[in-house]
Amino acid sequence: MLEVKNLTVCYDTAMLLNEVSLKVNRGELVGLVGPNGAGKTTLMRAISGLVLWERQMKRGTRAGNITLTGEVYFQGQRIDGLPPHRIARMGLVLCPERRRPFSELSVEENLKAGAYRVRGRRAYRDTLELVYQMFPVLQKRARQVSATLSGGEQQMLALGRALMTRPVLLCIDEPSTGLSPLIKGELFAKIGEINRSGITMLLVEQDVRQTLAMAGRSYILSHSKIVAQGKKDELMADETIRQSYLGL
Amino acid sequence: MLANILVTTLVNGAAYAMLAVGFSLIFGVGRIINLAHTAYYMLAGYSIFTLVRVAGLAYVPAMALSILLVTVVAVLCYKLLIDPMREHETTVLIITIALALVFQELMLKYFGGHFRSVPGVAEGSLSILGVQVTRQQAITCAVLAVILAAVWLLLHRTRFGLAVRATAQDMEAANLMGMDVSRIATLTAAVSAALSAAAGALVAPLNILEPHMWLNPLTIILAIIVLGGMGSIKGSIYGAAIIALSESLVIFLIPQGSFLKGAFSLLIMIIVLLIRPEGLFGVALEGER
Amino acid sequence: MIRVWLLRLYRDFKGDILALPGRTLACLAVLALFIAPLFIRDTYILRIITLTAVYAVFAASWDLLSGYVGQLNLGHALFFGVAAYTSAMLNLHLGLPPVLTIPLGALAAVMAGLVVGIPCLRLKGQYLSLATLAFPIILKGLVYLFKEYTGGELGISGISRLAGSRLVECYIALALGAVLCFLIWKITDSNLGLIFHAIREDEITARASGINTTAYKLLAFCLSGLFAGIAGGFFAHYMRLAGPFTLDVLLSFQAIIWTIFGGITTIYGSVAGVIILFPLMEILRAFPEIRMLLFAAVIVIVLRFMPEGVVPWFLDRVEKECPRCKERNAFTRTRCRVCRVSLSEREVRARTTTRA
Ligand SMILES: Nc1ncnc2c1ncn2[C@@H]1O[C@H](COP(=O)(O)OP(=O)(O)OP(=O)(O)O)[C@@H](O)[C@H]1O
Ligand SMILES: [Mg+2]
């Protein structure tokens, strides 16, 4: 469904991604783990078109000196070079790092904004109901301004908003930062649930144990390169990988 | 006296509110401080003047045509000069000042520095609740109020409005939700300019036209925006009411007040800022950088 | 002794100035400005040179506050006007000579800096800009209101001259301009400049690292007010007039236009901006009808293609930065003059690998 081939991203003279290749098949939940600063977020942003968008926004400045080479295919179509909103409309949706709610909008308006590309009142209602079912808190807080939600609630809002777009492939970047262990467990349960409901997922996480357990396959990204991939057992079997990248 | 204060406040307040709302919109969505905003207001005035006095059109079609023309000019300026510079915040500032100067000088060249006036739609006056107002004032005020209400509905009840507000909050996230941010920004620029032009067209019969007429309203709407809280539509409207009221009070109650009206509005702005640094209706988001 | 010193000076000059085309050109320009008045008898041109020097200080002081500390001040004319009016009044009513009135005027501008700075400390970003815009307009309203003291629209005239001849005045302006601009540049290049930079980039983090951002921001307002004030007082004595023009919004905008045209956060950019644009504006007097139009058009078009300003654009063409030690080099060099690393585009690319 998603195929990344030799993706290289340079910001000015720094190389943030070096010939990264990865593949996500329909229905899978693929994990992506790695140390801080490995380039996971950059990979997500490159796939969803934000890197190129940033380049276009900052053209003419030093920060806009970004090069991106390689290919990204989504459902057989080449998407590197497409603007982010086109990619999102195709069904590849990123739930960004640090949640990024529309802070002055209410919870309900946030969800409505998520449903921007969903046509028709019925479709909108159904999806909203689904999201409310999955995250009952959101319904309770529907009228509250989203900036005043707690961190955990904001995360649920971010996920809910991403779901409102009716994604085919959902990329989630670090959903568990700042959550209490209890809520974290709940959140991972929800993520599993979403995946089982038929949405393919690419999950970036710092909680390696959880991610490996949940994901069918996982990739390990380190120093802007993919250093290993495989099922949990395969990765855990390799002593070097286990110690130097997973810390387990 | 009281009636005079009231009427002036209403008419000016509505016009200021409309200018301020337009300014707020493009500031919110594009983070652009468009100092050429009131130049569109001036352009609309001159365009009506030309169409009515020279081409002999009636006021209403002239108005519609002017708004359209000015909006087209504004969108062209946005696309060619402002949008490509977006990353350079201060450069945008200068470019918009320079644009305003260009328009001012063009008007000076073609129309000269004399005061000009535009005929209104209606003559005579009527009395509302015992207050004498000219028909023109009443019509201007009513139309301004209707347009303001329409803008509010546009922002809060439509898909486009939601996209505008979402984009103003977080462009990247809006992108990820499938919103075509640059198209939304262009449309917002158009709406913003159209509002400015409409305000100019509507008050043209009440005011005199001259090429420097953009500078005063510019400082006043800046005060309004800051007073109301940047990017807040509600704030712009309340801010406009406050400033317009204070202005008419100063003009009618203090001898030589017209020298002081700008200074007084700005003083109010500074006082409000000292008490509430984020403006009356701005949201102070802690930790936002 | 003197010979050693001179030799050292020469070596520094060769190493630090001749090595870079940008600096060489700047030196030549300053030199030309200093020599030119000797051959010019035309008072009109002398006047342009003098005012260029005065405005250069004014623009540089704006860059110090707005470019370096990031407190985008839209009402910079306040400092200029306060100093001009103060100097004029002191001179006219108390009969003080310019040597005293200009520093006192500058002191008043520093006070104005405090008056603006203290309320503005609570404000951020665009709120701050727009609030600062208000102050000179308020003051201008007061000037019109108290006509008896301020002369209203006509301003205060009949102040004493700086010096006997226009030529001497011109040299005083040039010397003062050069010294003050150099001083401002030195400030931005010092530790203080580093702190200012930190505040601009991220005030919260700067505060968290133990920098008293409040005090430094106030200091920036005062310093900027001081330099702009000196320019303002000088201007009043030179023109022998302090009028409401010195508080005009358009004068504030001029400072911004000059600086951004030249290149913000560089100091030399703002000076270059004045040196290019102010005489240009005078040359354009040849076309009085479309003068402002041409001026504005030039700015729009130039900035459209050089969004970071003329000087940075030019420097990017004639100099390149060493990728390793970040020293600047003339574009003709193939190896860095400091660390000897190769500067050729291809090798830089090849060397770029993963940062590990
Ligand atoms: N715009 C940028 N310009 C230059 N360097 C950048 C930029 N954005 C990120 N980086 C650098 O690229 C590296 C990778 O960043 P990225 O955010 O992708 O890491 P990450 O794997 O998501 O880390 P984390 O787990 O901490 O979120 C980091 O070293 C970061 O400092
Ligand atoms: Mg990350």
Image (cartoon, coloured by chain):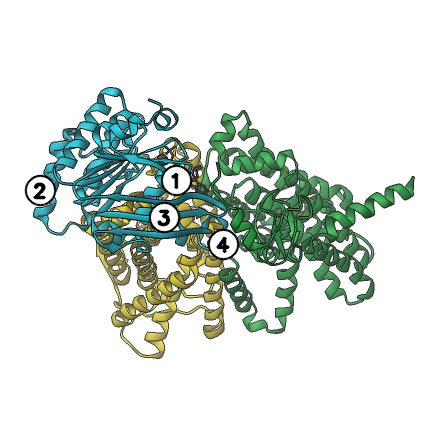
Q: Secondary structure at mark 2?
A: helix
Q: Is residue A169 left or right of residue B11?
A: left
Query: Which label sits in the foreground, 3 or 4?
Result: 3
Callout 1 amino acid: Lys
Specify whether disc 1 shares its chain with disc 2: yes
Q: Which chain is green?
A: C
Query: Which label sits in the foreground, 4 or 2?
Result: 2
Q: Percent from the top left, x then y, of residue A164? A: 17, 42
Callout 2 amino acid: Asp
Tell me if residue B286 can be seen: yes
Alpha carbon of mark 4 to alpha carbon of mark 2: how far?
Answer: 47 Å
Q: Which chain is cyan?
A: A
Answer above or below: position of A150 versus C13.
above
Alpha carbon of mark 1 to alpha carbon of mark 3: how far?
Answer: 10 Å
**Which shade is chain B?**
yellow
Q: The residue marked by circle 3 belongs to what chain? A: A
Which mark, residue A7? 3
Q: Do the residues bearing badges 1 and 3 touch, measured as CB atoms within 8 Å?
A: no
Which residue is at 10% across, 48% downward?
A121
Of pointers 2 and 3, the one earlier in the residue sequence: 3
Q: Residue at label 1?
A: A225
Q: Percent from the top left, x then y, of residue A55? A: 41, 52
Of pointers 1 and 2, the one earlier in the residue sequence: 2
Q: Is residue C293 left or right of residue B66?
A: right
Answer above or below: position of B215 versus B47.
above
Q: Residue at label 2?
A: A126
Q: Residue at label 4?
A: B91
